[in-house]
Image (tube, grey):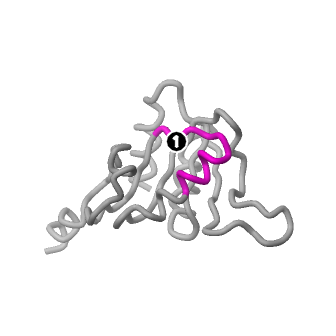
Amino acid sequence: EVFARWVVADALTLEPKPVAVGGLELGAVPVACCVMSHSDGLLRTFIVRKQKKEHGAEQQIEGRVEAGDRVIVVDDVITTGAATQKAIDAVEARGGEVVAVYCLVDRQEDTLPELAARGIRSAMTLDDLIAATS
């Protein structure tokens, strides 16, 4: 809950403001939902599937992300950032603009250069977590 409040407070300082929050299944789903629920209706949520569905609507993104939408991507833990980058790629393929990336724990391990260049906003690093529990 504290993380969600921090993300909302920070994301809503961006101009123009983002309209949605989401991330890659499965770890990012509860994070995105918690952030959305603390946004007082300012952010809608979306989920990026690891792979496009083979049946039904055959969507990779569940929820509304439209061309030109400014969105934030969240994750619980980022190691290399490959999963987070996959979510970003899906949003951008749909025409959305990822304006910020947030994670609860950044493990700081060989993060993909394209993700690192975005400036991941993390609540804590793995070293912070270890220090706090020692």
Q: Which residue is mark 1?
A: 98
106, above or below 114, in the image: below
**Residue depicted at x 61% and y 48%:** 91
Q: Amino acid at mark 1?
A: Val
Residue 47 spot, x, y in % from top left:
63, 59
Quadrant of the frame with the C terminus: bottom left
Q: Residue furthest right?
A: 56
Query: Per the image, is 93 magenta?
Result: yes
Residue 126 spot, x, y in % from top left:
24, 66
Residue 115 spot, x, y in % from top left:
39, 51
Q: Secondary structure at mark 1?
A: strand
**Residue depicted at x 48% and y 54%:** 74
Q: Nearer the viewer, residue 82 or 72?
A: 82
131, above or below 116, in the image: below
Query: Would residue 118 be found to the left or right of residue 53 on screen?
Result: left
**Residue depicted at x 71% and y 57%:** 62
**Residue depicted at x 53% and y 59%:** 86
2, above or below 65, in the image: below
Quadrant of the frame with the N terminus: bottom left
Region of the chain picked out in magenta, as a range: 87-99
Query: Would residue 47 be found to the left or right of residue 8 on screen?
Result: right
